[in-house]
Amino acid sequence: MSDALKHECGIAQIRLLKPLEFYKKKYGSAFYGVNKMYLLMEKQHNRGQDGAGFASIKLDTKPGERYISRVRSIAQQPIQDIFAQINERINEELTNHPEYADDVAAQKKNIPYIGEVFLGHVRYGTFGKNSVESVHPFLRQNNWMHRNLILAGNFNMTNVKDLFGNLVDLGQHPKEYTDTITIMEKIGHFLDASVTKIYKKLKKEGYNKIESSPLIAERINLVKILKKAAKNWDGGYAMAGLLGHGDSFVLRDPAGIRPTYYYKDDEVVVVASERPVIQTVFNLDFDQVKELEPGCAIITKKSGEVSIERILEPLERKSCSFERIYFSRGSDAEIYQERKELGKLLMPEVLEAINFDTKNSVFSYIPNTAETSFFGMIESVEEHLNERKTQDIIAGNGELSKQEVIDILSERPRIEKIAIKDVKLRTFITEDSSRDDLVAHVYDVTYGVIKPTDNLVIIDDSIVRGTTLKKSIIKMMDRLHPKSIVVVSSAPQIRYPDCYGIDMANLESLVAFQAALALLKDTGKFDLVEEVYNKCLTQVDLKDSEVVNYVQEIYAPFTDKQISAKISELLTHESVKAEVKIIFQPVSNLHIACPNDLGDWYFTGNYPTDGGNRVVNRAFINFFEGNKERAY
């Protein structure tokens, strides 16, 4: 993606089902779980580079022994930083106590971070400050082991205000107004209530306090706690939690917006945000890693019993298509094929844009995530050429000379690496004119391969704000003096803000929205903007279930091609001499390429939860009033 766009985060959870001595004997180290956690988090660094956190729990410790360890970082390379700290601590203990080397029991008792239950998190900060206090996992501490709650998630809630108010109504005084704290305290409230209820029952059964503690841990019903806590959540989430005594869970939202995958055998239970991560780290086949169904939780009791439980009734499946287009690792077998298909499906419109002149067209991509779609696009070009070659040879009626046949068969798509991102370049000056000049040089171009008669076709996986295209890429492409520049987005036009964990909180920064406003002005229909604003205002006090997305009316007067043409105009700097065309994937093609992931609210405004409509209307009100606050 040429625009800088951030995804909220990724999770990783491991529960070791055997004693640590087993892993020492089989794999040579009692730190097996720590090592695997490092790999799971590092393989998901694409999902978050603002911060990383790690927590572990030791099972069956004695009173007075530390059983929870946590480390968080917002260093420039946070994953490496937290594991450097862990490694330093482990090595320090082993150096000072060489007798621990082959004594797993001593290691577990005395060395932090070693344990049987692990939770990791990588984060992009999309809400609040990027301080270490904002980094997951969060910890809710208590002297009762089973009341300790460690929480991390890939999520965003649209109704934090209501959930926060519920806590206040319960008599609580949450320390922060954030969705993570709110969710943690919500779960914590029902956890506390459950523990109290179980203790009272045990007391009636004749057990004293010391005897009750392990029995409470056995009887805690995470299914009931999660059902009560999550009853009114509205958002996209994969929520992972650990209880101090060793129970663990991961809960996925009922629309399946955020991804969650798991694997289980007799040694380990592992959950992560991405399937290929688990495959790679544990050397598994594709079908060994399962997708957690929407509205379900995978729950592992301290005893090692594992179950998949229905927590919330599933909504219509609307798993995020943006995950497939851009955010998830392209090494996933399904995602790789889907991205190739997105490239293939664009080719009819691309061929039309270049007047089918493949001989005088150069095809390239904007690094790096668009590369797979580029492969699909080139396969489609080759299919087109093969069809044309076949027709030319058939038309020759066997009278073509050898050289003519060679000439026909020798035509290939012209593929070049045109745009190269200078990853080390930083725009360190904030003054606009200076900064714009620096931004224009974020990409280098390859000189000497483009002729003045050429069309230059560049595929990107999505175009959100278009800033980098206008200020850098198109201007740099124009230096090569092509006849035309065709920028192809494998994603549809991004028209609406996200509210489920991707950093698109407002409308006015989206170039498709800017194009629609410009078209309304051009056609004398700009009064529609105030009409939509007034409609949005009438819904401010309605229940979320009653709110309608009136912002869709802003786009309704225009076709996709009209908006694309206006985007082309907006993103073409006056200094550019080449003709510029910008082509977007139709939503219908997106559904063909990603048939199981139909969460397309970014492109259609069809939000998968009631809270989404409230958020988009609030975003429009904020735009109209010049309010720079987030819409959720």
Image (spheres, rainbow, N blue to C red):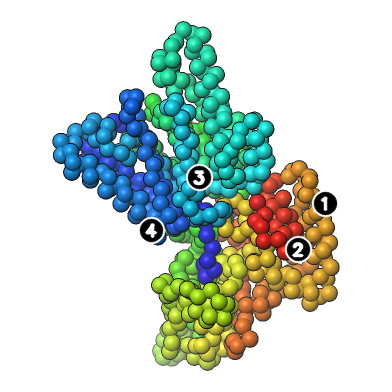
Upstream in sequence: badge 1 or badge 3: 3
Label 3: how many Cα within 10 Å (few below 14, some 14–19, many 20+): many
How dense is the environment of label 1, judged by Cα within 10 Å: few (below 14), some, or many (20 and up)?
Answer: few
Which three-letter amino acid code belongs to the residue tagged 3?
Answer: Gly
Instruction: Farthest residue to the left: give it.
Output: 99
- The residue indicated by pointer 3 is 153
Residue bearing mark 2:
624
Along the line of sight, which residue is nearer the eye, 352 or 546?
546
Residue 408 versus residue 498 in the image, above or below: below
* Disc 4, SS: loop
Residue 572 in picture, x, y percent from top left: 62, 81
**Disc 1: which residue:** 538
- Which residue shows up at 18% across the image and 38% down it? 97
Closer to the chain start, of discs 2 and 1, is 1
The residues tagged by marks 4 and 1 sit, at their Cα atoms, a distance apart of 47 Å
Instruction: Identify the amino acid type marked 2.
Output: Phe
Residue at which label 4 appears: 77
How many callouts does the rendering have? 4
Mark 4 belongs to which amino acid?
Answer: Gln
Viewer-proximal residue, 45 or 352?
Answer: 45
Q: What residue type is labelled 1?
A: Thr
